[in-house]
Image (spheres, rainbow, N blue to C red):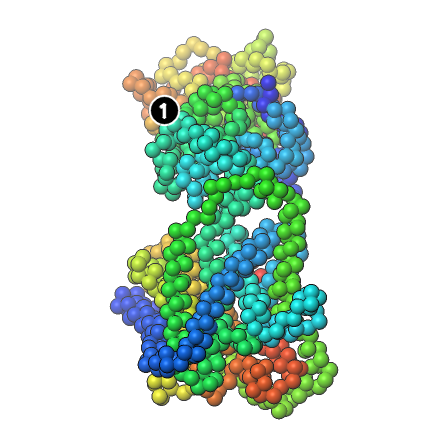
Amino acid sequence: MKESKSIGEAINRLSGSPIARKILYSFAVFYLIAFILLPPLLGISFKLDLIDQVFRDEILLNRAKSAIMWSFTIAFIIAILDLIAGIPMAWIIARGKSNLINILDAFVDIPFVIPTVALGFSTLLFWNSNYSPLKFLGVNVSPGFFLILLLHFAFSFPVIVRVMVGELLTYKDVYENAAKSLGAKSFTVARTVTLPILKPGLVAAFLLAFARSLSETGATMIVAGAFENGPIFIKNAKDAGLEGPMVLVSFILIIASITVFGIIRILGTKFRIPIGNVYPDFEALLSKSISVKIRNVLTITIFIFLVFIPSIFITSPVLGAISDGTLVKAISGEGIWSSFWNSMILSYTIGIIATLINVITGFPVAILIARKRLGHIGSILLEAAVNVPIVVPSVALGVSLGFFWRTFSFLSEFWIIIFAHTTITYTYFVQAMAAAIEGIPEEMEETARTLGSKALGVFKNIIVPLTKYSIFSGAILMFTRSVDETGATTAVSQKLQTAPVLLVNWIKGIVPATTSDIALGISFLVLTSFISLLVLRLVVYRRR
Amino acid sequence: MTKVRVVSLTKNYGDIKALKQVNLEVEEREYLSIIGPSGCGKTTLIKLIGGIVAPSSGEIYIDEQNVTDTPIEDRNTGYVFQEIALFPHLKVNENVGYGPLVKGEDREVNRRQVREMLDLLSLEDQASFFPVELSGGAKQKTAIGRALASGSKLLLLDEPLGMLDLKIRNELRYELRKLVKDLNLTAIHVTHDQEEAMSISDRVVIMKAGEIVEVGTPRKLYIHPSKIFTAKFLGEANFLEGKVEKIEGNYYQVNVSGNKLIALGEGAVLKENEKCVLAIRPEYVKLNKKKLNEINTWSCYVINVSFIGSTILYNIITDTGKKLTTKYILTENEPDISVGDKLYATLSSEHLLIYDYPHEGLDKALDLE
């Protein structure tokens, strides 16, 4: 006991040494560069010589070009459509006074809770069911471009709403009152004052929706049919054993994504929302309470039919699975269910390990970013490096990571999947922690230091207690993201199957499974994600 | 002509009564300030007039039109916010031109109005600056220009100078009054700064706990406040509890701990043997080293001397244990007084104010909460 106390004191004393701190931060930055940033960038460059194959095959080259073009086109269309539909929804949630708003607020997160594979399957089932609103109009939606649009609209929608609700809640309404006192109607206020002031939030929301659409693989695989965007092309090339096309499209997607993101970020800050013209009569009409009601009804209708029902439609065959004996088969681990439970254990083990690694290695980097310990430019560069994994499409990331980590022959497939997952989830934790640490006034740390606390003491007694919610929520987000991850895992895995990868195989018919099997398997995955997010919500509730 | 009239205006926030049955009239081209301690309801009152919050009951008239249910954007008021609230994404000229723009003014007319306003406020050189590039004073001038350019004849100023440095605040307040008078506007100005209110207002409203305590000219409120709270809140005052012994015309003889004090009680309605409170401003308590044959003179000791720049405060204690504060303007021949000196304090009977003893108790009546 005494010995452990003295070891603790020694570590605490050591933390006061500038050299010890430098070593710790250097290690964290080294990890970021060596394990997060370089593998996706280097991995693909190892195989660049293979892309020659594609240039020799014109059909393949055209397929690759078209897939890349469609990836960006779909992401752009989706980001725009989701902004149009998501901003009014964010407005309703942030400004609504009804108690029903809380329910609506919770429902918006549904596509977050459902693993992408399940979302894809659910979307496919809904739009081909007799309940599909398009069926009423006599339109059949078969797998392909249009279904991908509907799917991407649904899963990118909450991103826009979440970002914009946050922006609206922190926005000072004094600007709106000022504009109104000058005679501006509510629509004019929103158009000329609120949205231009919230422009950074709009750009961030656009980029996140764009990134989510660009990078999504698992769900898209299920609804794509014969249509190919970038990730589907990579997946198909991988299945066909065509490494060259896989490398080419991954390489272009990685470079193009980083470039497009950089351009949007730079142009986004320079772009001014035009407000030079105001149409008082028309805008007064749009500001009338009846117009607002119509807009709200339309927004909620779009949400219900394009987001909510397609996301939860998966629950309908689950009821059948309970009555037709599939549930019993599943619980007893009969047939295909034995490998399902193994894949669940594997998913959870990987999720836990990846989360722990990222918490340990991400914390110092979050401090470096939040406290600008490497100077202003250093902090920006560090943040850009941290963001690379979410900018790059996950399947392209997976391909690159697979190439990179497999060069280390001593690494087992299990560890390669873990490294892929740490790369994919790293950004979520570091960003959440950097924001939380930034929110703690530096004076608090300085006060603790003047009272004799060493760096470790400050970390233990100030940073951790004040950011414990963010640590927890960041960890949960990382964990659920890891458990649900499909695209990159598909690309790096060879023999091992995580639960989402296994479910894709069931859905694709690679392993024979009934609809009840698929629906129930997905429900188990949804349930675990839901419980994780429920824990998160309870923590938030307790904190309030 | 009455520009603004509020009738029985009440605002409740749950169980909290922020404003209780307030009645007030503001004349056209009047500069009226509202002051009171924190939480007295002054900001609530101006927000209700501006339409930023809705009243729980009562009515608001602007130009004799009932605007109680009129939305903020249709009230045609120029509102200047405490937070300044310049639109950060718009340049100075765009901020100033925002009102005419949203009202659909012709582009050329708008441009001309903005130019005139920037000239008036000496902001021409900063027309293309964003708010973040402006000094505090320039920001506030822009906010005032923006409110004025909307064409309103009623300016509502919610602590408009509150976020500025003392020096800039002192300069701007006179500019503000000049602007209001030059442009024939009516202004309602909420402030916590008494000096600001007294120096620029035609009339001042004193509020406490959601109610108007007193309305009057700054001079009247300072020299002859009719309410004991006004005497306490506006400037400084010494308070003495006593009993009316004799009344001769407008003069009241009051017994304060065995000492007789004569007070000119114009307008007071007290009877003999009634408990009362006397109040006197520190500047009307004079100190002498020799005993003069004057009424209202007490012997005392100096217990503290405070140098406050342009004035010196002396805290004294009388032989009967009453603590008083006196104030002298700093001059070359101010009295040579030190702590411990025995002196004689004379309380000017013309400035000794007399009030009914408050039924809720003196402490409660003077309480700023």
Rendered residue at 56%/73% (across/down): A144
Label 1 marks a residue whose chain is B
Compare residues A176 and A126 and report the one nearer the observer: A126
Percent x, y of residue A344:
55, 82
Rendered residue at 64%/26% (across/down): B65
Please say if B362 is above or below A201.
above
- Count all numbered tags in the image, as a single digit: 1
Residue under circle 1? B311
Q: Which quadrant holds the C terminus of chain B?
A: top right
Percent x, y of residue A173:
53, 44
Please say if B167 is above or below A140.
above
* In the image: residue B329, left or right of residue A395: left
Rendered residue at 53%/64% (across/down): A156
Q: Secondary structure at mark 1?
A: strand
Compare residues A534 and B148 and report the one nearer the observer: B148
Rendered residue at 36%/20% (across/down): B329
**Amino acid at the residue labelled 1:** Thr
Please say if B287 is above or below A432.
above
Please say if A30 is above or below A283.
below
